[in-house]
Image (tube, rainbow, N blue to C red):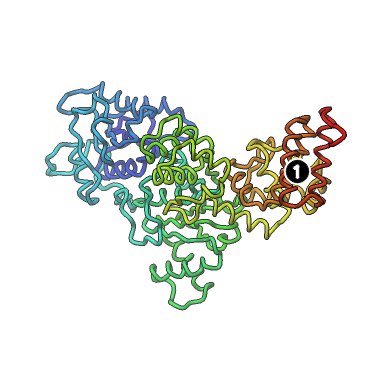
Amino acid sequence: MGGELVDFFVSHAGADRAWAEWVAWQLTDAGYTVELDVWDWAAGRNFITAMSDALERCDRVVALFSAAYFDRSRYTTEEWAAAALHVPEMDQGRLVPVRAEEVPAAEVPALLRPLVFRDIFGVDEEEARQVLLETVHGPRRPDHAPVFPGRGSPGSLARLGGAGPRLPGSVPQFWGDVPARNPGFTGRDGLLVAVRDRLLAGGRAVVQALHGMGGVGKTQLAAEYAHRFAGAYDLVWWINAEQADLIGEQFAALGSELGCADAGAGIQAVRSAVLRELRRRERWLLVFDNAEEPADVRGWLPGGNGHVLVTSRERGWAEVAVAVEVDVLARAESVAILRDRVPGLADADADALAGQLGDLPLAITQAAGYLAETGMTASRFLELLATRAGVILAQARPVTYPYSLAAATQLTADKLARDDPAAADLADMCAFLAPEPIPEELFTSRAAELPAALAARAADPLAWPQTVAHLTRRALARVDPRGLVMHRLTQAILRDRLTAEDTLASASNLAADLYELGEERAARDLDQDTLDRRRRVLGEDHPHTLRSASNLALDLRELGEADDNS
């Protein structure tokens, strides 16, 4: 807003952005001038400088109190502290506190506890608006509109034809099949704000594809966005896109609600009618959840002035949407979830669990539920995770997820095996390597030693990248500049699902890799174990058993441990 003086600066945490937009709108419409970071600060501007300038320009600061607001790591600490230290008169304090949620007194800094605050949550919208306006200009309603000379006029936004946001948390008239809000949703504030910023920026960004591996929380993120910013939309419609041929039925239900599509109309007629109706409307959000590939939703994108979110494991959305990768949780967030849900869990145990679970949200949630239900110790859980990952990660599925992590991973692996057996072989081999970047040369330089289908691909410089792409497209692995990376839990589940014979073949291949890397003793130990197991499973004379015996003999000879009986 340049160097102009303003009546209010709205101070808020990122998690409360929807509240901040609602407050800023109501104050502006009441005739006040308002500065709000997400409205007035250009991208790339120095945040600290912008905040300092805003505090200098404003008469007062509206502070939206919440648990997130008092997180000491946030810049809001500087905002309220600066406001509190520049109080022109005690009876007209510069800091105007309103609460956007219940905050325990112990979480409020001691300096702020004596302040009188008002609540704008838990009431209907008109009452919340009245509370806000009374708080900023006193408890008595004025006899005339609260206009400050030369600083705007009340109702200005409404007269321009703009529709203000509803009270955060209130759902619009058209609210279709949106999953219930998860009260245990934790973190992701930065990602949610980034998604909101891009959607408001317009252009291609009004369609965003949240992609990532199974269990990383894509659907949870989309649902939280829908609930958190529900007040900004007049229509929110959730579409299960996992089966592309059922999208039309869900659009037909939307067309019926909007009154734009006749009952019994064909899919093409429904598509045309609903898309046409959405293009003439504003303030709508469509969510296509769990889409298999871009082609499944491309023909259902309306364009116009609404927003679209897509969740998918697929990575190739560049031609349809702005792709947003959803990664695992920050370690602090994982530890917080575990400690909150497992009574008495020590910090060190929570950190160890989070590390072995790779900070994957679904795995963290399942582990927390399983430990809380069974009373199992963290050390025992980690033992089972190392030896029976597929079993332990099939337990305690949260109600907010359709599948356990084990089931979701196995379904994806099964589909890959049907669609591309060579890529499935590659996934199985990656499952037995370290959860670190795997150089492609490990496969392409030794193509002859790979399973037949994969060997042909690895030897072909054109076919090999396609094989890797098929694997990463299913989010079973991702491409790092240093090679393929597979999450440690994906590896554990894939290993656990293999038959005893697929398993032994992979162990034999791993031993060969160790031998080539100069790790002769490790290769010897693994070859000895594989030979013992093949004797039990396949018999003494099976060709694979004899191959293991030959491999072990080579190891022993290299180490100088061979004897006449080897």
- Give residue 188's position: percent from left, percent from top: 44, 40
The residue carrying mark 1 is: 531
Task: Give the camera-side residue of 554 and 122.
Answer: 554
Q: Report the side of 287 relative to 501 (left or right).
A: left
Kind of element beneath mark 1:
helix
**In-image side of 357 versus 106 (left or right):** right
Q: Residue at x 65, y 48 (%)?
A: 472
> What percent of the width, then of the height, locates residue 7?
27, 33
Name the residue rendered at 46%, 53% in the picture. Answer: 401
The extreme front residue here reads: 565
Q: For residue 506, which quarter of the picture?
A: top right
In this view, which residue lies farthest toward the top? 85
Within-10-Å neighbours for mark 1: few <14, some 14–19, many 20+: many
| Residue 204 shows up from this direction | no
Q: Amino acid at mark 1?
A: Leu
Q: Residue furthest right?
A: 564
Task: Give the image location of residue 556, x and y in percent.
Answer: 82, 32
Foreground residue among 382 and 30? 382
Pick the quarter of the image with the C terminus: top right
Q: Is residue 47 left or right of residue 429?
A: left
* Quarter of the image with the N terminus in it: top left
x, y percent for residue 554: 84, 36
Which residue: 41% across, 31% down? 346
* Residue 70 in sight in this render: yes
Name the quadrant containing residue 40. Answer: top left
Picture mark count:
1
Q: Nearer the viewer, residue 350 or 552?
A: 552
Instruction: Using the image as rendered, state which of residue 28 and residue 352 is in the foreground.
Output: 352
Residue at 39% in and 43% down = 372
Q: Is residue 41 left or right of residue 31?
A: right
